[in-house]
Image (spheres, grey):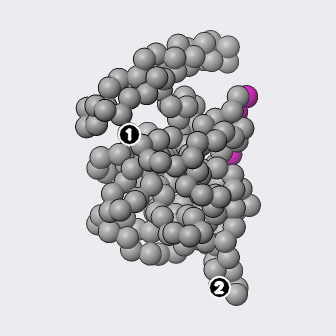
Amino acid sequence: KELAEEIELVFATKKPPTPSLNPSTTLSRLPDQFVRGGGCFHALSKLWKITSSGYQQIPICHLKKGDVVLSADMSNGMINFVLDTVECLIEHIYSKPMNVFMLDSSLGLTATHPVWINGKFIHPFTSDWTMTTSMNVFNLVMKGRHCVVAGSNVFLPVVTLGHNYTGDIVSHDYFGTN
């Protein structure tokens, strides 16, 4: 464990590469998501859970395996609302605060967690979202491998683990595959 943490610290403190698609976006250090944990949701990010009386907004930290939530199939590059079942809820607890970018009180994501805004996937660190910190973050594996729809004031598709989407921003050889 000590050796893994030492290696991770060397990697995480290296100067990040200059983005080839947007060289004007620079970072002084790699986002926290490049260390263990990957892209994640703030614990109070709200999803739309299906209940016997309809839809209910619920913080991601209160979901459990088997819950059905409003989701989005993004496989054709468009939003197609669907229902999907939570296969697994993962909580990452950190020993130091993790940067989280908040759109508003209903949606917070780590720096490189892809979210669909204005017809394309973006990373929150490239937006004007407010940065805060959190000691724990969450992510999901969805049975149908769809995005989940998050937020209160807007319906934003946000990728989950194992999503299998390809393209700029959203492709990931590890977090984005089965």
Measured along the vertical axis of the image, is residue 78 above or below residue 9?
Answer: below
Q: How many marks?
A: 2
Residue at 69% across, 67% down: 58
**Which residue is pictured at 55% across the width and 31% down the height?**
32
Q: Which mark is residue 156?
A: none
Mark 1 lies on residue: 173
Q: Position of residue 13 (x, y in %)?
A: 52, 17
Disc 2 or 1, which lies upstream in sequence? 2
Q: Amino acid at mark 1?
A: Asp
144 is within the stretch colored magenta: no
Q: Which residues are magenta?
A: 91-95
Q: Specify the principal SS of the magenta part.
A: strand
Residue at x-position 40% and y-position 59%: 117
Residue assigned mark 2: 54
Residue 105 location (% of width, % of height): 65, 58
Is residue 85 among the parts visible in the rendering? no
Instruction: Give the crowd class for mark 1: few <14, some 14-19, many >=20 residues within 10 Å.
Output: few
Q: Is residue 38 visible?
A: yes
Residue 113 percent location from the top left of the image: 48, 46
Name the secondary structure under disc 2.
Answer: strand
Q: Is residue 92 magenta?
A: yes
Local secondary structure at mark 1? loop
Residue sitting at 54 percent across and 60 percent down?
142
